[in-house]
Amino acid sequence: MSKTVTDNTLQAIISHAKEYGFVFPSSEIYDGLSAVYDYGPYGAQLKKNIRDYWWKSMTQMNDNIVGIDAAIFMHPTTWKASGHVDSFSDPLIDNKDSKKRYRVDHLIEAHADKLNEEAAKAADGGAALRDRAMKLLADMDTLLANDDFAGLGALIQDHKIQCSVSGTSNWTEIRQFNLMFSTELGSVAEDANTIYLRPETAQGIFVNFLNVQKTARMKIPFGIAQTGKAFRNEIVARQFIFRMREFEQMEMQFFVKPGTQKEWYEHWKNERMNWHLSLGIAADKYRFHDHVKLAHYADAALDIEYEFPFGFKEVEGIHSRTDYDLTRHQEFSKKKLQYFDTEINQHYVPYVIETSIGLDRMFLLILSNAYEEEQIQKEDGTTDARVVLHLPAKLAPIKLAVLPLTKKDGLPELAKALMDECKPSFHCFFEEKDAIGKRYRRQDAIGTPFCVTIDHQTKEDNTVTVRFRDSMQQERIPMSEVKALVLKHIA
Ligand code: ATP
């Protein structure tokens, strides 16, 4: 039997995610809401498993990291102190003919992609086109780093970059747009205060720095981890759950002694990459991307990028945030946010290394990496096809499917007994309808790593057939060993 991959496009993944209950457009009966999505039964479980895997790796496997769960709403001054009110914005440009709005960096990057595509097809090898694309991106980085909007506008005109809808280069000036959603706290309009839906979970950690340090008696270096919803009014929201307006982050702030931030930055850069690789994903699907333009709070920053079906893109950020956040919260709250280091008998404001990963983006990564359309060449010369999700067993929503061969002769009862034995330890799925091959295919499509078939021989010698998702190999083993086999793989 041989396998070949036939398709791995984002569109196929989106359809599959919907058809098999992973991800639905939000409020779909009303035609959906742009860049907002709901997770279905298998999606919610897969998402929870990813979150739990991250949470365990942070808070259980590190003695010096503890978790919190801060509220989404925060005192509005938080966002003044953090700099989000003044500078959490993207440069935007509108096409006057189509009225379509673009993020300037996305517009320029798309043009560079187009040049590279033309280069790939060019008869002369396309070196000149590739150079042009590279220079365009380098120029953009420099201009963005200097907030030089006039220069960016000129760059767009010089390259004759056009709107994909109108096909014209009739552009407005570039301006900034704040990405925070605001709402009002209080029932009487006149007394209401404008508050924001948090655009990142990190600030909930910073404002609780002393509460956590004191109550959990943490000594520097130590970390505080948190998972939770964040909201951004993204201008260009496409590519499915890659860029959403409501999403979930998994963030950890690691507080260190000033002067040691470089070594901890390296430490967390490597730790986080190892976490990704621990899921069995090929190393060449990942790369680091050092930031040229540093955020207002950072002295070093990089992205961990993954090769999504639409190219290498950020999945996680590692940021050396200096003492910026704690110092600003000290200033704005007039409360001391310092640590007394007994080793050197000194107070100081700690420096911070942040690891920040999007749970939904990680979900898309896992799904993209797992999705495969296989053509199966059988030994008798015929071909077959299947769609399979090669999910890591520890993340799969269902670990074991228990399938009685027929609905009679006491086989469902035996299957139910196995379900009862395994259910308390991991998610199982029982199904007695349809031919066994069809049932296997359905489990392949949701990524179930193991199927067990109960047949007439089971009644005689208590053995079952285990079928492995990836190899499709089958093996006869005692029913009493099934639970241990699954546990071994998901440990
Ligand atoms: P991008 O450049 O893609 O907009 P960012 O640099 O603004 O992302 P950060 O502020 O560093 O992102 O956020 C940390 C992580 O949160 C990102 O690496 C990403 O995984 C996730 N994230 C950020 N914005 C979104 C979004 N709109 N939808 C889904 N995930 C997001």
Image (cartoon, rainbow, N blue to C red):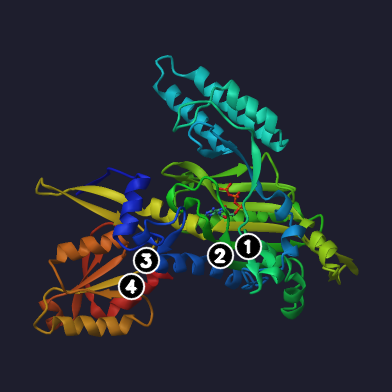
Q: Label 2 amino acid?
A: Lys
Q: Are marks 4 and 2 in contact (CB under 8 Å)?
A: no
Amino acid bearing label 4: Leu
In three-dimensional space, the C-alpha distance between marks 2 and 3, rounded to whole angstroms, equals 17 Å
- Disc 4 beta carbon < 8 A from ligand 1? no
Residue marked by disc 3: 40
The picture quadrant where one finds residue 274 is: bottom right
- The reply, left or right, for residue 354 in relation to residue 367 is right
Q: Which mark is residue 198?
A: 1
Which numbered disc, 4 or 2, marks the residue closer to the eye?
2
Mark 1 lies on a secondary structure that is loop
Q: Earlier in the sequence, mark 4 or mark 1?
A: 1
Drawn side of residue 434 relative to residue 94, left or right? left
N-terminal of the two: label 2 or label 3? Answer: 3
Determine the residue positioned at 63% across, 73% down: 68
Which residue is painted at 63% across and 29% down in the image? 153
Res. 228 in view: yes
The residue at which mark 2 appears reads as: 229
Mark 2 surroundings within 10 Å by alpha-carbon count, few (fewer than 14), some (14 through 19), many (20 or more) = some
Above or below, comparing residue 176 to residue 33 in the picture? above
View extreme (right): residue: 345
Reading the chain from its start, which is encountered first: label 1 or label 3? Answer: 3
Side (left or right) of 297 relative to 230: right
Q: Which residue is mark 4?
A: 485
How far across and how far down the image is residue 73, in percent? Answer: 64, 69
For discs 1 and 3, the disc positioned in front in the rendered view? 1
Pointer 1: residues within 10 angstroms few (<14), some, or many (20+)?
many
Q: Which structural element holds mark 4?
A: helix
Which of the two discs, 4 and 2, labels the residue nearer the N terminus? 2
